[in-house]
Amino acid sequence: MIYLDYQATTPLAPEVAAAMRPWIEEKFANPHSPSRWGREADAAVDVARNQVERAMGLRDGSLAFTGSATEAINWALKGTVEKAPPERNRIVTVATEHAAVLDTCEWLTDRGIDLTILPVKPNGRIDLEDLERELDDRVLLVAVMLVNNEIGVIQPVNEIARMAHDAGALMLCDAVQGFGRIEIPDAADLVAISAHKIHGPKGIGALWMRDGAEPAPLLHGGGQERQMRSGTLSPALCVGFGEAAKLAASRATRDYDYVQKLWTAALQALGPGWVINGDIRHRYHGNLNIRREGVDGARMMADLRDIAFSLGSACASGSGRPSHVLRALGLSYPQSRSSIRLGFGRYTTRQDLTGACQRIAAVAREQEHLDA
Ligand code: PLP
């Protein structure tokens, strides 16, 4: 199989698997218990926390591990609303956000939140003037992602955060697809990340919180994460996340340059006739979302079962619904249907990628021929 679905998840780094192994096989102690073994596990969790914090590069805040980025986002949104003064009851977000943000915001509208969903320009970026118009003294939180999971487009998060701050609001950034790939903007107050997008294990995410902007707890119980998040932490998952973050930070330039080379090679191998969905310049280049007239993306997936790629987002792919992100760009239904997403990175070989792209292009030409 040629794996080209790096936005859905990434392969576990060998270094991460090796770091986790002792914590799966031998060291089973509860990191919250006071025994010697418990304290050893707790120390390993602390090292991991420092590694993730250092890789994020943010100051004046702290990091709590969660079960996923989805949990971190739910916590940030619901917990911020929980602590808000009654007059601050508006949330502003964007049409191209991940379902973890959009569905949670929608859920909050039944609980008194006035929700504004900003449109995006055809290139997938928000118009800052649209945001400016919406910001008033009732806005509690502005939620905008760093790198879009479907089209790779990068939003100007620091500018958005400063505008939110000027209106007395907080800023939540879903940095799941940006962490470990590009720099994390330092002006956001709440930042959600996930290990499995950076060659770490699934089942662990984290919420970084600026001092003073900590949301009310989402999960109640033992208060294991400094009384803010309950549930026994898995040292294996924490250690894996820490190692993945350390690795991503130490290889940042190398990984980034390699992805640039893969992007160029993929476009060359695909040949003419393709349109790239979303901005090219403000984009993470490990995400190539493309369309071509006459292509049926779902049929192409069926024809190329040994290549793992995606139609829009992993969640939208399974549902048969047209992607909300592509719709937000203004694409027609046929244009969305003719779009595919190729995601690649550290462990993708150039040969696998170009071979897959040539076969994708060949199937596209066949489909064009059949439809003619
Ligand atoms: N946000 C974005 C942009 C994502 O791509 C994902 C995962 O697909 C999530 C949030 C949710 O992350 P997790 O799988 O850790 O819940």
Image (cartoon, rainbow, N blue to C red):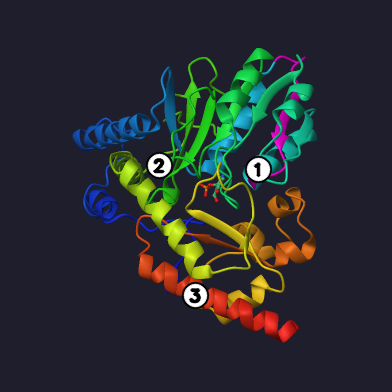
Looking at the image, tell me whether mark 2 or mark 1 is earlier in sequence order: 1
Task: Classify the position of the N terminus by image quarter.
Answer: bottom left
**Picture coordinates of residue 268 (x, y %)?**
48, 65
Nearer to the camera, 184 or 82: 184
**Picture coordinates of residue 305 (x, y %)?**
52, 78
Q: CA distance from mark 2 to mark 1?
A: 19 Å
The answer to whether the residues at label 2 and label 3 have Cβ atoms under 8 Å apart is no
**Picture coordinates of residue 161 (x, y %)?**
60, 23
- Residue depicted at 51% across the width and 31% down the height: 191
| Residue 43 highlighted magenta (yes or no) | no
Nearer to the camera, 208 or 23: 208
Label 2 Cα crowd, 10 Å radius (few <14 / some 14-19 / many 20+): many
The disc label shown at residue 97, or none? 1
- Residue depicted at 72% across the width and 40% down the height: 120
Residue 65 against residue 324 in the figure, above or below: above
Q: CA distance from mark 2 to mark 3?
A: 29 Å
- Residue 235, visible in the rendered structure: no
Q: Residue furthest front?
A: 272
The residue tagged 3 is: 358
Q: Which residues are magenta?
A: 85-98
Label 1 Cα crowd, 10 Å radius (few <14 / some 14-19 / many 20+): many
The answer to whether the residues at label 1 and label 3 have Cβ atoms under 8 Å apart is no
Q: Residue furthest bottom?
A: 370
The answer to whether the residues at label 2 and label 1 have Cβ atoms under 8 Å apart is no
Element type where label 2 sits in the image: loop
Element type where label 3 sits in the image: helix
Note whether ligand 1 is within 8 Å of mark 1: yes
> Looking at the image, is mark 2 or mark 3 nearer the viewer?
3
- Residue depicted at 24% across the width and 48% down the height: 19
Nearer to the camera, 74 or 98: 98
Residue 207 against residue 333 in the figure, above or below: above
Nearer to the camera, 276 or 340: 276
